[in-house]
Amino acid sequence: MIKIKPSKKLASLPPYLFARINAIKTEAYKKNLDVIDLVMGNPDMPTPSHIVERLCDSVQNHPHTHRYPQAKGMPRFRKAVSSWMQRRFGVNIDPETEVSALIGSKEGIAHLCMTYLNPGDIALVCDPAYPVHFNGVILAGGKIHSLPLLAENKFLPDLSKVPAKVAKKAKLLFLNYPNNPTTGIIEDIGFLYDAVAFAKKYNILLIYDNAYSEVTFDGYVAPSIFQIPGGKDVALEFHSTSKTFNMAGWRIGWVCGLQKLMYPLEKFKSFLDYGAPTFIQLAAAAALEGSQECVKEQCAIYKRRRDKMVDGLNKIGWPAQKPKASMYLWLKLPPSVKKMNSLEFCEKLLEETGVAITPGVGFGKCGEGYVRMALVTHDNRFHDALLRIKKFLKNTAN
């Protein structure tokens, strides 16, 4: 067998802690342990039927949709995106030049890093963050300047603390609100005004990851960066159907913004992929064009799960707050557990109870001391999870 090493870029990636948790889950399944999987933000609810029906009709009755797709996205999909952005945020997006289809926003963000970053270029990345925000930079050969997300700052980065010499060299700034994993939201729109001004001052491309814009509760409405004057001049905004329409496995999303900012990504992708399948684009267009009642219904389900789990955690002595957005709970480690880090806690909880959650350190150094819990199982299972966690906390108090 030949001996060959992977690239230094791949070797430089931080340990993928989700793989460790998945390995423990696999062992638990082998032992017939009843696993309650709250690790990934992987929606357990089905894709709405009208979207599935559109896919089936396209595949069965329109064989031309089986051919190579238009890499940028078919006109029908791009027009649907443009209309949805107008209805939802009141912003004008040219479907011809300012929308591009993605094979999921994760793919788009990773490819964008490769599009814009040269080896050694600096990217401003929040910590904790959705892993592709920092992994994409690393794989592109860039360098990360971390922006801590702290509870005392409502999990917003303090851009005023970025040294001027760093800001002058930075090429990208990543923002993600509603935030994964912290569930933080933008309550004061002034933050986005400041972010746009910061990006303009230092000539930085602002990457606005808006994947959770529609998973909100208690009357909160998430904004678009394009609602801010000048936002379109400095930013690209990424969206996904994964959480909005329970289409995580379909792998379809989009990026929008000025053509001059998007074109390099479109060019890069043209060398690497053929784009999302046409029949999936048509189904996604149906999702965007159709009634949004299904989105409201799923938000009501997530809210019910949120309330049940947060109330239950507080009753068993694990302080928790109700987030206004996302499908997660971001929790400090229980006060009764003082000697474990987040990975040790999650491993032990899974091994002893079958409840699987994510260690906060998997999202960055500032995630240590926290865990993320995804609200992605049947409502009745949260009662079982609470009973197991209560017993676990009692037995492991130190």
Image (cartoon, rainbow, N blue to C red):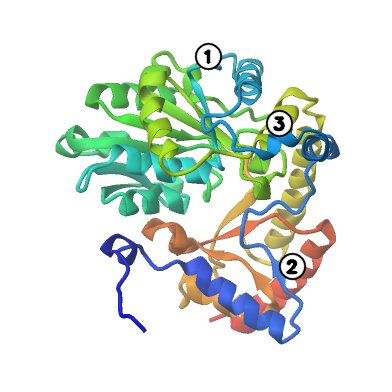
The residue closer to the viewer here, 255 or 209, is 255
Using the numbered discs, state the Cα–Cα distance from disc 1 to disc 3 in whole angstroms.
Answer: 19 Å
Return the residue at label 1: 94
SS category of the residue bearing label 1? loop
Q: Position of residue 35 (x, y in %)?
A: 72, 73
- The answer to whether residue 219 is above or below residue 154 is above
Q: Position of residue 111 (x, y in %)?
A: 41, 43
Say which label, 1 or 2, has the lower sequence index: 1
- The picture quadrant where one finds residue 44 is bottom right
Q: Identify residue type, mark 1.
A: Asp
Number of residues whose C-alpha sits closer than 10 Å to that of mark 3, classed few (under 14), some (14–19) or many (20 or more):
many
Q: Position of residue 390 (x, y in %)?
A: 71, 73
Say which label, 1 or 3, has the lower sequence index: 1
Say which label, 2 or 3, has the lower sequence index: 3
Q: Identify residue type, mark 3.
A: Leu
Label drawn at residue 25: none
Q: Is residue 93 something that shows in the picture?
A: yes
Q: Residue at x 54, y 68 (%)?
A: 335
- The picture quadrant where one finds residue 366 is bottom left
Label drawn at residue 386: 2
Return the residue at label 3: 282
The residue closer to the viewer here, 66 or 109, is 66
